[in-house]
Image (tube, rainbow, N blue to C red):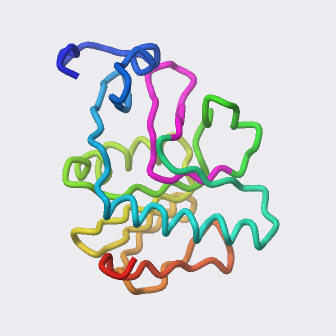
């Protein structure tokens, strides 16, 4: 990302022009570089994806769950492109081969050392304003899951090992075991 200058305004075209292997998110015209995920991050992502996918499949639901890298175009303005760790989309018309156009119903972000500010502040407000219904911040360093239910305007905190109810799906609770067990 050395070629990008602070203060410049970028578009989705700039995302697609990044060199191979380089990833970034675009929020309100600002580029934010993304470091490769750690092994712990990937283990948690895989665990959560499997839990959600299996629940949706068992229920015969129409929702789909996608793991990063998966493009989410929050607005139709060309200045917002994110790759949430997990996105659950229940409106099939929002999906095409490029990704999701509009807000996913449920987003889960797994905090990495370099993403803490993005996940807890920038994305929190962006997702809420875009129309995401539920947002989970999974923080392995703090062994904590923060659940924002934007429909009910509630915030709940859980520790790894506790059952975390999914507001989007009646009957789905996920217990994220300690990282060493996943």
Q: Which residues are magenta?
A: 70-89
Residue 90 magenta-highlighted: no
Residue at the image point whose x is 31% and y is 60% from the top? 39
Tell which of 153 and 134 is nearer to you: 134
> Can residue 159 be spotted in the picture?
no
Residue at the image point whose x is 68% and y is 72% from the top? 55
Q: Residue furthest right?
A: 60
- Position above or below: 106 against 14: below
- How many labels sit on residues? 0
Which quadrant of the view contains residue 118? top left
Tell which of 85 and 19 is nearer to you: 19
Residue at the image point whose x is 17% and y is 19% from the top? 2
- Judged left or right of residue 32, residue 68 is right
Which quadrant of the view contains residue 141? bottom left
- Position above or below: 60 against 102: below
Residue 75: where, in percent of width, then height?
Answer: 54, 29
Residue 42: where, in percent of width, then height?
Answer: 39, 59
Q: Main secondary structure of the magenta part?
A: loop
Q: Residue furthest bottom?
A: 162
Which quadrant of the view contains residue 157? bottom left
Residue 51: where, in percent of width, then height?
Answer: 58, 71
> Can residue 141 be spotted in the picture?
yes
Residue 88: where, in percent of width, then height?
Answer: 61, 54
């Amino acid at each position: 990302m050395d070629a990008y200058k602070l203060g410049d305004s970028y578009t989705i075209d700039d995302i697609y022009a990044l060199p191979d292997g380089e990833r970034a998110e675009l929020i309100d015209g600002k580029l934010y570089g993304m470091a490769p995920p750690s092994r712990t991050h990937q283990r948690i992502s895989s665990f959560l994806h499997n839990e959600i996918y299996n629940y949706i499949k068992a229920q015969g639901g129409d929702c789909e769950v996608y793991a990063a890298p998966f493009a989410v175009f929050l607005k139709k303005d060309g200045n917002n492109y994110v790759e949430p760790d997990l996105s659950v989309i229940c409106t099939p018309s929002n999906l095409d081969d490029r990704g999701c156009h509009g807000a996913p119903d449920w987003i889960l972000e797994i905090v990495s050392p370099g993403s803490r500010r993005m996940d807890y502040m920038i994305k929190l407000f962006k997702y809420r304003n875009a129309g995401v219904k539920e947002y989970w911040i999974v923080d392995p360093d703090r062994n904590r899951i923060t659940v924002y239910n934007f429909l009910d305007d509630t915030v709940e905190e859980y520790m790894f090992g506790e059952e975390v109810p999914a507001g989007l799906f009646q009957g789905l609770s996920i217990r994220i075991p300690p990282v060493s067990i996943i």
